[in-house]
Image (cartoon, rainbow, N blue to C red):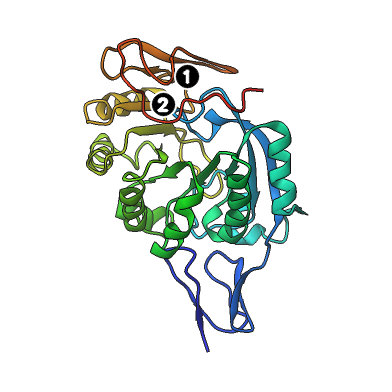
Amino acid sequence: MKTRCDFCYRECSLGEGQRGVCHIRVNRGGTIVTENYGEVVALALDPIEKKPLYHFRPGSYTLSVALFGCNLSCSFCQNYSISQKEFHQQRPNRYISPEVFIQQAVERNVSVSFTYSEPIVWQDYLLDCARMAKDEAIPTILVSNGTFSKASLTRILPFIDAYSIDLKGDESFYRRYCNGSAKPVIAGLETLAKTSATVEVTTLLIEGEHTLSDVKELGTILSDLGIRVWHLSRYHPAYKLNLPPTDESFLQEALAAAKELKIPHIYGGNSRQDQDTYCPECGALLIKRFPHQTKVFLKEGRCTCSHQLYGDMESRGLI
């Protein structure tokens, strides 16, 4: 008798003892469980800009947590040692209960982020933590590849305040490099863009695999969905992909192409260029980002011209 997992778009049907593509969801006695529930492989206090999130509590810090696992197998994965199944038994971990994790955030007066690996595949732990965070009025952040199932997105939506979602490329790119699909990501973004949550999208640009035409096509999709913030980030060799790093000049061309579209806020990643936030109405500098400092020139989230900047501009977590 097989049981279906509904944590991600794959919806794996698993017999007794079988594991999902993520390698951590397993059928035990007819019930699918997260085998590594609470076994934390990464815990850190990060600047929120690292997520990257530029329109949610700028200049603040967030307590980041990860369990092992991912439902994709991107050949360029930056965090392969805590996400790819061949490393599952090699990565040290320690058990941290949701109660202990949230108490650490309360003591530091910071938000919490579910990040680094793929939180969708350990969403039972994510949700247990996020529910407690809500009870303590702690902001919650999800950094994800966005391959939700409809059921999982419905479960998660009430408990997450900000999303950093990867859109890696078109459907062909996902098949070639990720053993995945762009379709569930786009479907999820369509839903998220209609909510009150802050939503930012990141695309890692691999020069030679992404073209300027690709950038325009992806940007048009995001613009049509109503996405307001898009980060274009430079690729560096990692895991199984050893192509040359994306050149700064290509990133600048891609950023220029993206700015021709109707997405108000375009940023560069793995670069010191295009880091600041300007008012879409009058062009005034609203947020200045330095390597280790962020300066916010807003009053109650507004520019002096009265434009309300997209996102959550509260200052909780400035430590």
Residue at the image point whose x is 39% and y is 26% from the top: 267
Q: Position of residue 50 (x, y in %)?
A: 55, 31
Q: Does the residue at mark 2 contact the one at mark 1 (Cβ under 8 Å)?
A: yes
Amino acid carrying mark 2 in the image:
Gly
Label 1 secondary element? loop
Q: What residue does disc 1 label?
A: 272
In the picture provided, is 104 more to the left or to the right than 154? right
In the picture provided, is 299 more to the left or to the right than 69? left
Asked whether 48 or 237 is in front, the reply is: 48
Asked whether 125 or 252 is in front, the reply is: 125
CA gap between label 2 and label 1 equals 7 Å
Q: What residue does disc 2 label?
A: 268
Asked whether 182 or 281 is in front, the reply is: 281
In the image, residue 6 above or below residue 287:
below
Q: Position of residue 115 (x, y in %)?
A: 57, 45
Residue at the image point whose x is 36% and y is 32% from the top: 229
Q: Name which quarter of the figure residue 202 lies in.
A: top left
Q: Position of residue 12 (x, y in %)?
A: 47, 73
In the image, residue 273 above or below residue 127:
above
| Image quarter hosting the C terminus | top right
